[in-house]
Amino acid sequence: MPANGQRREIRLCVIGESSVGKTTLLRQYVYGTPDEGHEGALGEFTFDVQVQTGSELVDVRLVILDYRGGRGPDDAAEETAFRGKHGFLAVADLAEPRTLYALEQWIPAVRQVAGGVPVRVFLNRVDTAPERVGPYTRWLQAHYPDVAFSAGSAQTGQGVTEAFEALLFEAVETSVKQPDSLEVSDAGMIILRYAAKRGPIGVTLKELMRIIHMVDFQGLVEEVDALVHMGLVTREDFGPASFRVTVTERGEAVAQWVAA
């Protein structure tokens, strides 16, 4: 990593109706094959990449969540699955028009919980229903003119890498452009200072719960997600209710600046 480079954790999420090919799409991007046999814990895939934004090379710990099963956008909003994410790839099936119209629920749910993070649409199965690209395109342009989209195939790999890399670039660029004068809450600052003190060892959720009493469990998780979104810490999940927080170079600089 360059001496003056940045390191960020970027969390993306693949959303959409069940059976639109989300898991196959993600397997194709991560492993280069749609075949089963590769699986991330709880549908989460983590790996390191580098992203060039302008003149700056950013080291990224990329975490992609496959939002699986029959759960809908309301379920995600209620369980805060969308919080702390930096971008969303919404998938629709060209062979199933209802999955396109369902984006009218998915996209607002994402924006309500995650704020103004990048959202892109991937029209899957162009290899089996290419004639529907035109109608789907017109519908998207009419309903979501501000949302970028592309067509491809999770099965053949057409357009998959391009879609993920476009979303990743936009998410990193948005994160890098965030102002330096960050609004960190009192609880968030305690987390940041403690994580900075622990350095590469990090601090676990259990440890944070012992030292922070001004917020409840859900509030603590939201404070950590806010710090992740600002690029001040990274979060390593061990399960549905267990994780470790590690300070980033930017977070360490903010903690030192506040303490000065």
Image (cartoon, rainbow, N blue to C red):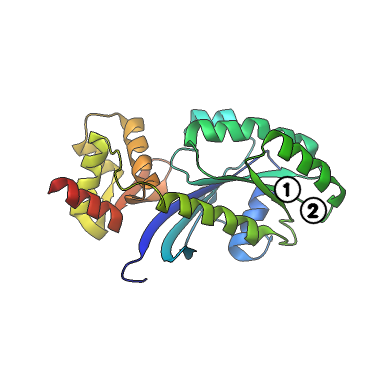
- Relative depth, front residue between 37 and 33: 33
184 sits left or right of 138 in the view? left
Q: Position of residue 204 (x, y in %)?
A: 28, 47
112 sits left or right of 96 in the view? left
Residue 110 disc label: none
Q: Residue at x 77, y 44 (%)?
A: 137
Find residue 144 and report its image quarter. Answer: top right
Identify the residue position indicated by label 2 in the image.
126
40 sits left or right of 238 in the view? right
> Counting other residues with Cα less than 10 Å from the Cα at mark 2, is it few (<14), some (14-19), or many (20 or more)?
many
Q: Amino acid at mark 2?
A: Val
**Total marks placed:** 2
- Relative depth, front residue between 244 and 147: 147
What whole-number distance in Å separates the C-alpha atoms at marks 1 and 2? 7 Å
Q: Amino acid at mark 1?
A: Leu
Q: Is residue 220 visible?
A: yes
Residue 112 sits above or below residue 15 on the image: above
Labelled pair 1, 2 in contact (Cβ < 8 Å): yes
Q: Secondary structure at mark 1?
A: strand
